[in-house]
Image (cartoon, rainbow, N blue to C red):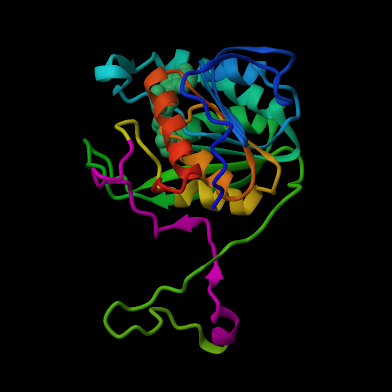
Amino acid sequence: MPTDTSTTQAAPLNQSRRAWWQGTYKGDIYRHAQGEIVRADALHCLESLRESCADIVFLDPPFNLGKKYGKNGSRHDRKKESEYLEYMGKVIARSATVLKEGGALYLYHIPTWAIRLSPYLERHLNFRHWIAISMKNSFVRGDYLYPAHYALLYYTKDKPTVFNRPKVPKPICSRCKKDLRDYGGYKGYVAHGINLSDVWDDVSPVRHRKTKTRAANELPLVIPERVITISGCSGGLVVDPFAGSGTTILAAMAAGMQFVAADCESEYCGLMHNRVSEYLSGKGSH
Ligand SMILES: C[S@@+](CC[C@H](N)C(=O)[O-])C[C@H]1O[C@@H](n2cnc3c(N)ncnc32)[C@H](O)[C@@H]1O
């Protein structure tokens, strides 16, 4: 684990000329050796980045469900449908511009919005996968089925430059410790794990009060870790313009990637900065 904390600072800087910005970026910036955290609107951050600078753009926006973010829940996440679509359309278009040729964009959302946002993605990028992430922490509503998955849409700008297919452990019976599935004559091929599919049913939501970094929908670390395993490269750049508690940053740093993370809430930017500093000093939980 890296131990260099010499480049972290207590208060935000107010300008930066790091290579990913077009000219000088002005605003509240927390700088680390591997990247920067800015307090900014997501679109403003994306518009300030150079074209074709990012290997991965990871979008985990507010879901427009009326959730409260910010100090004492001061910011409501509920826009008119047309306004939300227009804003997200711009975020997606600019994300595509910021991506390198062959770079990957991931959008994490509920299916209702993933389906409505896919035409915007289709305009700029190539579809690779709708990854269904099983998450049984919701409630059945009205005349609908019980919603039990989130969508992780995976697109690339032209053909992917990097594509790794992760292996995951075989499902094992908790009682007898034998394989849950019958692999027939292929047992030898799966001895060291099975290929990750587009259904991720082994991800648990971050629940525990001690480990949940804050109230803004912290993602389980395994999600950005897998994204980075699939599409990342050491020294490359990950951009997360709705970064929340900074889960993507930790996954990026662990993989030797650089990062630019934005959040409009200064509280969350400070929190991300502390989380990164703790990680670098070896104290932080992932
Ligand atoms: C779903 S959370 C992201 C959680 C994050 N992936 C994590 O693992 O912690 C969405 C975040 O976007 C931030 N946000 C909402 N609107 C924004 C905007 N227009 N620009 C930048 N950040 C925004 C919220 O403050 C919140 O922290």
State the residue in front, 237 or 82: 237
Q: Is 136 on the left-hand or right-hand side of 134?
A: left
The image shows residue 205, relative to residue 195, as above or below, that is above
Q: Quadrant of residue 203?
A: bottom left
Residue 167 can be seen, yes or no: yes
The structure residue drawn at horizontal position 55% and vertical position 77%, both measured from the top left corner, is 192
The structure residue drawn at horizontal position 54% and vertical position 42%, both measured from the top left corner, is 153
At which x and y percent is residue 154? Answer: 59, 43
State the residue in front, 190 or 285: 285
The image shows residue 110, relative to residue 51, as above or below, that is below
Q: Main secondary structure of the magenta part?
A: loop
Q: Is 79 on the left-hand or right-hand side of 277?
A: left
The image shows residue 257, relative to residue 31, as above or below, that is below
The image shows residue 63, relative to residue 162, as above or below, that is above
At which x and y percent is residue 170? Answer: 46, 74
At which x and y percent is residue 266? Answer: 41, 18
The structure residue drawn at horizontal position 70% and vertical position 41%, both measured from the top left corner, is 236
Which of the four quarters of the rendered structure image does ligand 1 lie in?
A: top left
State the residue in front, 280 or 19: 280
The structure residue drawn at horizontal position 34% and vertical position 83%, both measured from the top left corner, is 177
Q: Residue furthest front?
A: 6
Q: How many marks?
A: 0
At which x and y percent is residue 260? Answer: 59, 29
Is 283 in the magenta?
no
Q: Which residues are magenta?
A: 186-213
Residue 90 can be seen, yes or no: no
Q: Is 204 on the left-hand or right-hand side of 23?
A: left
Is 211 in the magenta?
yes
Q: Quadrant of residue 191?
A: bottom right
